[in-house]
Amino acid sequence: MMVIKGIGYWVWAVVLFALVACETGSYSDDFVLAYAELRIAERDYGETENGKAMRSQILQRHKLSAEDFEERMEKIKKEPQKWQEFQNRLVKILDSIANSLKGEEGS
C-alpha cells in the first residue's frame, strides 16, 4: 500500500469524493471512502492516542458514529456478494488515490 503522509487526508478525501459520489447497494462511496481512510489511519497511527483522534475525526467528517460504522460493516460482511462489491469499490477508490498521487508526482 502506498504512503500518503505527504498529503493531508482531507485533500485526497475531497478529491476522491468528487470522483466517486454515487450510491451503491446499502452503502455509499462516501462510506467506502470512510472505511479506506480508517484503515489507512489504523496502519499509520495504530492504537495510539493520535490514531484514536484521527479515527474520530474521520468518522465525524463522514457523519458516522463508531457504532453505526461497525453495524453497517457487519451487515456488509455477512453477505458475500455485498462484501465482494464493497471490496471491488474499495479497490477502485484506492486506485483513484494512487493515480492522483502519480499525477502530482509528475507535476
Image (cartoon, rainbow, N blue to C red):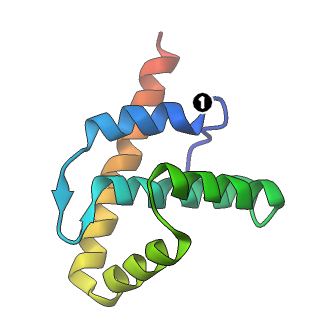
Q: Which of the pair 63/50 is nearer the observer?
A: 63
Q: Is residue 17 visible?
A: yes
Q: Is residue 21 above or below residue 87?
A: above
Q: Which of the pair 63/32 is nearer the observer?
A: 63
Q: Which of the pair 46/69 is nearer the observer?
A: 69
Residue at point 43% right, 82% down?
71
Q: Quadrant of residue 21?
A: top left
- Report the residue that reaches farthest toward the top: 107
**Residue at image mark 1:** 7
Q: Quadrant of residue 5?
A: top right
Residue at point 56% right, 61% down?
39
Residue at point 31% right, 50% down?
92
Q: Is residue 94 above or below residue 12?
A: below
Residue 42, given in percent of the width and then of the height, sits at 66, 61
Q: Is residue 106 above or below residue 90?
A: above
Q: Is residue 72 above or below residue 43?
A: below
Q: Is residue 98 visible?
A: no
Identify residue type, mark 1. Answer: Ile
| Image side of residue 27 versus residue 57, left or right | left
Residue 12, given in percent of the width and then of the height, sits at 47, 34
Residue 56, given in percent of the width and then of the height, sits at 63, 58
| Image side of residue 105 versus residue 97, left or right | right
| Element type where label 1 sits in the image | loop
Residue at point 41% right, 84% down?
74
| Image side of residue 60 versus residue 21, left or right | right
Q: Give neighbour class at mark 1: few <14, some 14-19, many 20+ (Cα, 10 Å).
A: few
- Report the residue that reaches farthest toward the bottom: 78
Q: How many marks?
A: 1
Residue 73, given in percent of the width and then of the height, sits at 41, 77
